[in-house]
């Protein structure tokens, strides 16, 4: 039931947000015109809703799941920066916070009874070869998607490498077992986070060098949260880095009002301008 509640909340919030924005902007809603337009429009909400429904564990508190999904999609319409100009010189806006990650972060902070789904939640009744096949399917499909569609393979490689490096450093400094520090990489949440969340093309850099810096920053903040004994650092780290990136985008491309000139009033025939 949880995934369906999450999807319904995500769909509804996305449709309401687009309807209001289209009405205010005097344009046709992006989902209008055909069923294909509706499906294309709801695809991001579908991905975010599923991610939230699969990653959050709220027991019977489905209201918290609905809140997370609604918060995720609403953030797309609230937290935006100008990334260019469109038709007529109007500014083009883009959201800078990863929707599903932001919804999860806010929900974890506000609902003390909500946590992250345990690694064994989806594979507790499987064994043998299935325990290897399921992660491989997610890794292979995620790799194909990020190779062909998003171009975020450098980000994935940098993220996995930086995460492993910080685990080795923390293990060396504290003289703790390295296996314990690397263990999160084997969890279902980490795999989904790596291939379907941190690589969101709308909220992550496109240039290779920037992708590497982005990944290292997320890993560094995660390590900081671990040192401070703060749980759920994976999601908090990504929220902080995407927020910082949004601030940088805002500072580098401030909103510029289109140039304008006052209308010149020409006197009509038989009239003289006022002195």
Image (cartoon, rainbow, N blue to C red):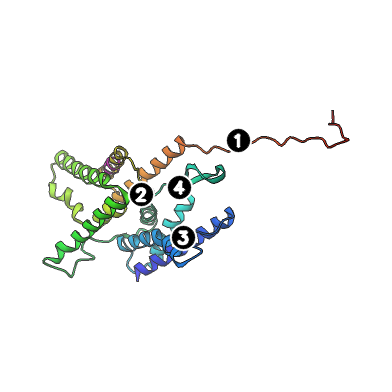
Q: Which residues are magenta?
A: 215-220
* Helix, strand or loop status at disc 4: strand
Residue labelled with disc 3 = 14
Residue 273, image x, y percentages: 83, 31
Residue density around tag 4, few if under 14, some if 14–19, many if 20 or more, within 10 Å: some
The answer to which of 149 and 221 lies nearer the viewer is 149
* Helix, strand or loop status at disc 1: loop
As displayed, is residue 113 above or below residue 102? below
- Dot 2 or dot 4: first in sequence order is 4
Quarter containing the N terminus = bottom left
* Helix, strand or loop status at disc 3: helix
As displayed, is residue 187 above or below residue 273? below
The answer to which of 120 and 30 lies nearer the viewer is 30
* Helix, strand or loop status at disc 2: loop
The mark found on residue 94 in the picture is: 4
Question: Would residue 113 be visible to someone looking at this image?
Answer: no
Residue labelled with disc 2 = 201
Residue labelled with disc 1 = 259
Asked whether 213 falls inside the magenta stretch, the response is no
Residue density around tag 3, few if under 14, some if 14–19, many if 20 or more, within 10 Å: many
- Dot 1 or dot 2: first in sequence order is 2
Residue 88, image x, y percentages: 57, 44
Residue 154, image x, y percentages: 25, 44
Give the Cα separation between the discs numbered 1 and 2: 32 Å
Asked whether 219 falls inside the magenta stretch, the response is yes
Residue appearing at x 13%, y 46% in the figure? 178
């Amino acid at each position: 039931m949880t995934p369906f509640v999450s999807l319904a909340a995500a769909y509804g919030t996305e449709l309401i947000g687009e309807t209001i924005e289209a009405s205010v902007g005097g344009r046709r809603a992006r989902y209008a015109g055909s069923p294909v337009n509706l499906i294309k429009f709801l695809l991001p909400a579908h991905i975010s809703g599923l991610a939230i429904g699969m990653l959050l564990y709220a027991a019977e508190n489905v209201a918290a799941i609905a809140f997370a999904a609604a918060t995720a999609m609403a953030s797309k319409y609230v937290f935006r920066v100008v990334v260019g100009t469109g038709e007529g010189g109007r500014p083009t806006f883009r959201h800078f916070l990863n929707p599903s990650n932001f919804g999860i972060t806010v929900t974890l902070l506000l609902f003390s009874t909500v946590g992250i789904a345990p690694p064994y939640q989806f594979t507790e009744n499987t064994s043998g070869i299935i325990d290897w096949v399921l992660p491989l399917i997610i890794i292979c499909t995620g790799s194909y998607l990020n190779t062909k569609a998003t171009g975020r393979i450098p980000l994935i490689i940098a993220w996995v490498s930086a995460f492993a490096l910080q685990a080795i450093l923390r293990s060396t400094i504290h003289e703790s077992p390295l296996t314990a520090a690397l263990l999160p990489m084997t969890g279902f949440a980490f795999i989904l986070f790596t291939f379907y969340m941190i690589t969101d093309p709308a909220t992550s850099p496109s240039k290779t060098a920037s992708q590497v810096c982005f990944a290292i920053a997320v890993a560094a903040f995660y390590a900081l949260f671990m040192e401070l004994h703060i749980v759920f650092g994976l999601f908090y780290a990504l929220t902080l880095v995407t927020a910082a990136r949004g601030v940088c985008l805002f500072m580098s491309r401030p909103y510029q009002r289109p140039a304008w000139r006052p209308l010149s009033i020409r006197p009509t025939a038989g009239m003289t301008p006022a002195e």
